[in-house]
Image (spheres, rainbow, N blue to C red):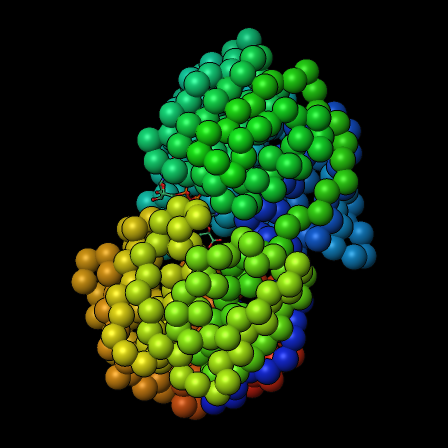
Amino acid sequence: MDKLIITGGVSLDGEIRISGAKNAALPILMGALLSDSAVRVGNVPHLHDITTTLELLGRMGVTITVDERSGVVIDPSTLTDTEAAYDLVKTMRASILVLGPLLAKFGTADVSLPGGCAIGSRPVDLHLRGLEQMGAKIKVENGYIRATSGNGLKGAHLMMDQVTVTGTENLMMAATLAKGRTIIENAAREPEVVDLANYLNSMGAEITGMGTSKIIINGVESLGGTQYDILPDRIETGTYLVAAAMTRGKVKLKDTDANQLESVLLKLKEAGADIAVGNDWITLDMHGKRPKAVNIRTAPYPAFPTDMQAQFTALNSVAEGSATIAETVFENRFMHVQEMQRMGADLQIQGNTVLSNGEGRLTAAPVMATDLRASASLVLAALVADGATVVERIYHIDRGYECIEEKLQQLGAKIRRVPSSA
Ligand code: EPZ
């Protein structure tokens, strides 16, 4: 498996382009299954999870054309199979997002039950319960979700017991072709949910309320082709802003949208960053100063995103002063803490909280990535640590960060990838 070698001590300085959002691209590409004709999706990031998604759709017989820029044309009219097999689903839990579209459009779906992952058990009970309330017949056997829509899905008034991003997305997609009106109460409000709704509306769906906790979908007869560009990745944006803050540098991020990560920008200002924003760019400048530690409590959007928790844990480990970070969304999202402690980070875990007191001095160590955002946070820590840090198992990073070493090299970082064969 490839690894990254990062030599710390460089203050980042430069500008890079932000890629399309992974967590919008996944439901949007799978949502193409709902269409009667080809759709073209632009600004698709080059990520391992995207490759997995295209392989999943390809195996169903869907015709896929990838163009030289970052566009994908998907024609679902050639579909021959409605199964999402275990060998792919086990590598990407988000494969569950084919369930709603397959049921709504083809009336049947066999999807491998996603297992847990490093950050938690990640059940999909709320997805299944909502679909059953819309009339689906669902059995879970031999590790597969066997679902049929009976004589077609019907609109329902759904109350989500817990805010779930992909649960909201699955049910919203299923409702676009259901008979009648569906209301999703306590819906996820993430920008990626809004992007998916806008994409579905461009295909002829009738969705309102996206971005609020009450989404209303009036079912339609059919959805057609469209051309749609994915919104920028707010978590990639936040990750590079934290990298610049930790290294006391400055950065300009282009093709991004500051409105999607206000909670992150406010916390970076609290940490002492000088931030300016335009309609498609953000600059951060530390003026060479050490960041101050900040208190964080993760929660569903628009609160502070759990996907930025590991990155701010890295920031606090080199920042001035004491602070606490509480993780309220996932039950086991602190694996990066043990790895950072091996680098000398002075962090203590108490229940769902990480305490830091700003005494830590990071030194290089061989560390191992465990999940997507934890691995990114180890790269950030390595940018500041004394010496050359080796980060193993970086396939986690390649799932969610396009060309991470090239982008960091553009910002002046000393980072290189060592292919596993080496
Ligand atoms: C999405 O995961 C994202 N993935 C995650 O990003 C992100 O961390 C998460 O939302 C929270 O923002 C994609 O969008 C592909 P949830 P998702 O359902 O939808 C519980 C990354 O790094 N829950 O909102 O799987 C669940 O256990 C990834 O890019 C149930 O109990 O997360 C969790 O505690 C990591 N039953 C909470 O809800 C269900 O049926 C929120 O999970 C569904 C969820």
The furthest residue to the left: 350
For residue 392, side relative to residue 118 (left or right): right
Q: Residue at x 63, y 80 (%)?
A: 14
* In-front residue for pair 63/229: 229
Locate the C terminus by quadrant: bottom right
- For the residue pair 144 and 173, the one nearer the viewer reads as 173
Residue 415 location, x and y as percent?
Answer: 56, 82
**Looking at the image, is 68 positioned above or below residue 341?**
above
Q: How many marks?
A: 0
| Image vertical order of residue 25 relative to residue 265, above or below | above
Q: Residue at x 61, y 57 (%)?
A: 257
Residue 393 image offset from top left, x and y in percent: 46, 68
Q: Which quadrant of the render holds ligand 1? A: top left
Does the image show residue 254?
A: yes
The residue located at (71%, 30%) in the rendering is 203
Work out whether 100 lies above or below 218: below
Q: Residue sitting at 47 percent across and 68 percent down? A: 376
* Outermost residue to the right: 68
Q: Is residue 351 left or right of residue 197?
A: left
Give the quarter of the image for residue 384.
bottom left
Q: Is residue 390 visible?
A: no
Q: Nearer the viewer, residue 310 or 286?
A: 286
Residue 392 percent coordinates (x, y): 45, 72
| Residue 108 picture quarter | top right
